[in-house]
Amino acid sequence: MSTPQTGDRQFRDDVVRIAALTVNTSVIEDLEFSNCRIIGPAVLALLDGVSLIGCRWDAPDLKAIFWEVPPSRPRVVGAVGVQRCVFSNCSFAEIGLAGPPDLRQLLQAGFN
């Protein structure tokens, strides 16, 4: 995995291991991933300002990857928070997604 250049904050055509991004933090923020292979194992809690455009998962359906978090439980320990990030044409391996029921509905509409 390459490191984004200072000020660039972008990964392109790369293999990105979530564990490498979370050595000192549990939140990934302000990054852009384009045509990358995102590798887990990890559960990503999608927070504010996250875009998933043309992405693919190694799971047969959304039921296999989505971890529903009720709105009454605002914090999930152990999940990796993702904030203000864009994932464009990325593939995800061993990655789950956590969020409220309304997020599930949004993801279902675009799940490949």
Image (cartoon, rainbow, N blue to C red):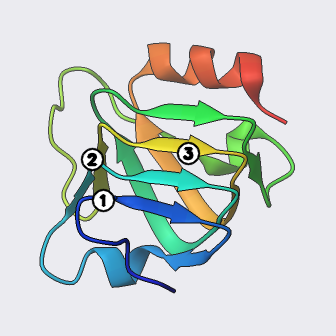
Callout 3: helix, strand or loop? strand
Residue 6 percent across, percent down from the top left: 24, 69
Q: Position of residue 74 (x, y in %)?
A: 15, 32
Residue name at image x 35 percent, y 52 percent: 31
First-in-chain label (1 vs 2):
2
Q: Nearer the viewer, residue 91 or 36?
A: 36
Name the image quarter holding residue 36: bottom right
The residue at 75%/36% (across/down) is: 54
**Mark linked to residue 30:** 2
* SS type, badge 2: loop
Q: Which mark, by number, is residue 102?
A: none
Which kind of residue does numbered mark 1 sit on?
A: Val
Spatial CA span between label 3 and label 2: 11 Å
Please, what is the three-letter code of the amino acid marked with disc 2? Asp
Looking at the image, is mark 1 or mark 3 nearer the viewer? Answer: 3
The residue depicted at 37 percent of the width and 71 percent of the height is 4
Total number of numbered labels?
3
Measuring from the top left, give residue 37's x and y in whole percent: 67, 69
Label 1, label 2: how far apart the Cα atoms are: 14 Å
* Residue with the mark numbered 1: 80
Q: Residues within 10 Å of mark 1 (few under 14, many from 20)?
A: many
Q: Say above or below: 85 vs 24.
A: above
Residue at the disc numbered 3? 87
Side (left or right) of 74 relative to 92: left
* Up/down of 40 relative to 8, above or below: below
Q: Earlier in the sequence, mark 3 or mark 2?
A: 2
